[in-house]
Image (cartoon, rainbow, N blue to C red):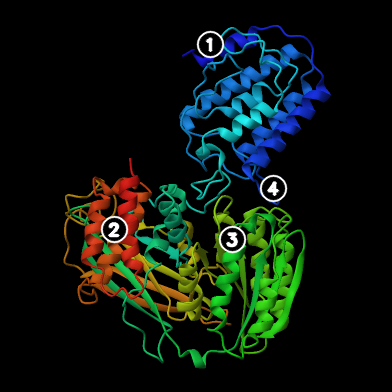
Amino acid sequence: MTDPLEVLKVAIKEKTPGSNPAHINQTLNRAMENFDRIQGLDTRMRPNTERPNFAAQISEGAKSMYNTIISRGGLTATTAIVAVGLFAFLPATRQGFLPLGIGKNDINVEPMILEKSESGGILELGERAAVAELVITADPSVEINTKDMVSASSAKQPINRAANLLARSEPRLLSRPTSISEASSERFANAHDNPLKITSEAPVSTFSIDVDTASYSIARSSIQAGYLPPFEAVRAEEFVNYFSYDYPTPAPDGAPFRPTVAMMPTPWNTGTQLLHIALQGQKPEIESRPPLNLVFLVDTSGSMASDNKLPLLKKSLQLMLNELRPKDDIAIVSYAGRAAVVLNPTPASDHATILAALNGLDSGGSTAGVEGLKTAYKLASQMKEDGEFSRVLLATDGDFNVGISDPKALEAYIANERDSGAYLSVLGFGRGNLDDSTMQALAQTGNGSAAYIDTLSEAQKVLVDQLTGSLFPIANDVKIEVEFNPEKISEYRLIGYETRILNREDFNNDRIDAGEIGAGHRVTAIYEVTPNGSSARLTDPLRYGAGASSVDTPSSKSDEVAHLRIRYKAPNTTTSQLIGVPISAKTLSTPTSEQTFATAIVGFAQLLRKNPYLGDWSFGAAITMAQSSIGDDPFGYRREAITLMRLAESLSP
């Protein structure tokens, strides 16, 4: 086999006569048309000038290159350079030249092989290098006269030869992916793992609660497609809060939620302990809840045509209709190139009218997301009456490319709109261009939650089983603050909630936005703490300063390990209320199978993030722990999690 790099070096040195630029453009366009035809591409792919994907950048660069080269010698040299770059790049990234709309990590491709064909033809590109021939023979008038690559008899073959070769190349390279791995155009909202804190230096931890579950569903879709999710797609708190737990419920006439605190040994680190803090929301009777005004804001842009996007979205929203009451009202707004009111406010009992409007939605165009939000908020405001709740339910793949496309600017806009009293929740659909970061920004700022729906079963969970909690709020701007006792705890770290961390002064500031809790919702936060005197301590005690002589040894001054404070606002109020709970041996609950399963899940999330604090703890250990504490699992969500752990273990290097 001839060394492809040497072959291409020879091509660069060849002298060739002049070339016709118009002919170059014509044949390049024909090549792209043939490629798209063979691929069966959806011509309605969403245009996105904000963030062109890898293939789009390559394509635009190629067009520019051909438009500016006027000599055939220049064309030969530049083409060879492009080919060298492609072949140098491909073995490292396992990435092929992909059609527009597919990210650079969508398909696994073996390294390409350049060979001279048995018949002495242009290039026998081994199993999968047809695209290189497409590039090299883009101008059919070019004679590439190199002894190792081409014979004169085939050098003038037209671009259709490249298309024919594409058609018979290995299907794994050419067919549209049936599942998407971590595509380059996807963006996720996350941050690096929370650092270890020394109690004597920073005894207070403050954060906003989070009831979102999107991260777990996104990771599940990746794993089931045969890929480990990127670490930034994994938010540990959303893994834990995806599951239901049997926590004690609050008294009917008391606070809207009840805290439960438990301590247990850390399975991955001998010498430390896990502090579980759980909040269980009230579960009011469905019949007693106020009427809901729902505005379905549906993304109908071109990228929503896939089966796991708009078609699944329609089926998902249909599921929830039977769960709504006759007093609830529904309106539908669609947005693509522009926003439009598809259904004016209609009683939820009028299924025929609602379904007709929903099924009439079709995809096409760009994404005028901000115009859609403005229309939906205006409609929600008009629908609301005293004592009622209005909520905009945004269903999208998350990409806003017309209007405000910067997440920070979107946050500012939503912050101004939430004062109207309308909540905003986000349902994500599909993969490939999923903009999780924008979805998170919208939901967090809009006093709502974010979920990702990849199957009809997930739609059942979010929009049927948990509908009341998803739509009916019981507490706004819920913040948690934990003050650790340096005489008992030398170090601690909060697992997850990286995007929800607050400054200490934010806790008492009612103008600072935080997360919401819906009816029946539960929230779990887990700290890994190091007791004083433990050999697992990672930092040395202070030699100087206040408390330097006492922080490394157990003390009997107080039996409190920490103090828990919770701030929240009742719906439609602006002043927060405070709950304080001392955490001591008397208040700690005995760990149950619920805390044990939550520990297995938070460990699973940390393994996917490759958290350095886990040492040699493994997926196998997480599986064993989860299996031993599976408990009541009527819908099979916990068993599914164990299956995901097993798959992740197999997919791990």
Distance (Cα) linking label 4 and label 2: 43 Å
Label whose residue precedes the other's in the sequence (4 or 2): 4
Residue position marked by numbered label 1 in the rendering: 6
Label whose residue precedes the other's in the sequence (4 or 1): 1
Within 10 Å of disc 2 (Cα), the crowding (few <14, some 14-19, many 20+) is many
Using the image as rendered, state which of residue 202 and residue 380 is in the foreground: 380
The type of residue carrying mark 4 is Asn
Q: Nearer the viewer, mark 4 or mark 3?
A: 3
Picture quadrant of residue 211: bottom left
The type of residue carrying mark 2 is Glu
Within 10 Å of disc 4 (Cα), the crowding (few <14, some 14-19, many 20+) is some
Mark seen at residue 48 = 4
User: Does the CB distance between marks 4 and 1 fall below 8 Å?
Assistant: no
Residue position marked by numbered label 3 in the rendering: 309
User: Does the CB distance between marks 2 and 3 fall below 8 Å?
Assistant: no
Distance (Cα) linking label 1 and label 2: 57 Å
User: Does the CB distance between marks 4 and 2 fall below 8 Å?
Assistant: no
Picture quadrant of residue 237: bottom left
The type of residue carrying mark 1 is Glu
Distance (Cα) linking label 4 and label 1: 38 Å
Q: Secondary structure at mark 4?
A: loop
The type of residue carrying mark 3 is Lys
Q: Is 96 left, or right, of 211 in this rendering?
A: right
Q: Nearer the viewer, mark 1 or mark 2?
A: 1
Residue at position x 57%, y 54% from top? 434
Locate the C terminus by quadrant: top left
Residue position marked by numbered label 2 in the rendering: 528
Residue at position x 57%, y 26% from top? 86
